Amino acid sequence: MMEIDWSVGEVLKAIRQNGLDNNTLIIFTSDNGPWLNFGNHAGSTGGLREGKGNSFEGGMRVPCLMRWKGTIPEGLISNSLLPQ
């Protein structure tokens, strides 16, 4: 986690230093769902149905953070799979 935190900080710093902070959509997300055929070694869907390779929520719903100054309001939380 410390490495990810540092790396993301470096990317954000470079965007800011190059004057792109107000004109850049930043998306931080994870891979979609666990490989269910690996049993309990591939992660958890948190109770959602299925995993990688299908369109059930367990294969599609993943954490995603976005920042786009002036376009996406700070603190907005969406549980939708579709744009709002």
Image (cartoon, rainbow, N blue to C red):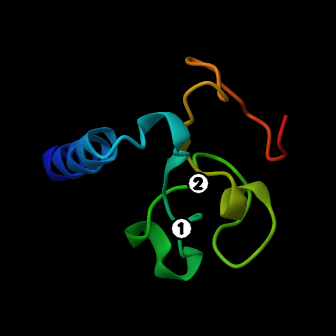
> What distance separates the C-alpha of mark 1 from that of mark 2?
7 Å
Count numbered badges in the picture: 2
User: In the figure, 74 relative to 58: above or below?
Assistant: above
Residue drawn at 28 percent across, 47 percent down: 8
Disc 2 crowd, CA 10 A, few/some/many (<14, 14-19, 20+): many
Horizontally, residue 14 falls left or right of residue 36, namely: left
Image location (x, y in percent) of residue 39: 48, 74
Which mark, residue 45? 2
Q: Residue at image x 42%, y 43%? A: 20
Residue type marked 2: Thr
Q: Secondary structure at mark 1?
A: loop
Please state which of residues 39 and 17 is positioned toward the viewer in this rendering. Answer: 17
The residue that disc 1 covers is: 34
CB-based contact (under 8 Å), mark 1 and mark 2 = yes
The image shows residue 32, relative to residue 45, as above or below, that is below
Return the residue nearer the eye: 33 or 49: 33
Going by the image, does 59 lie left or right of 81? left
At a point 48% along the width and 58% down the height, the residue shown is 30
State the residue at coordinates (65%, 28%). Answer: 72
In the image, 1: left or right of 40? left
Tag 1: residue type?
Pro
Q: Is residue 71 found left or right of 22 in the rendered image?
A: right
**Labels 1 and 2: the sequence-earlier one:** 1
Q: Residue 81 in the image: x percent, y percent? A: 79, 47
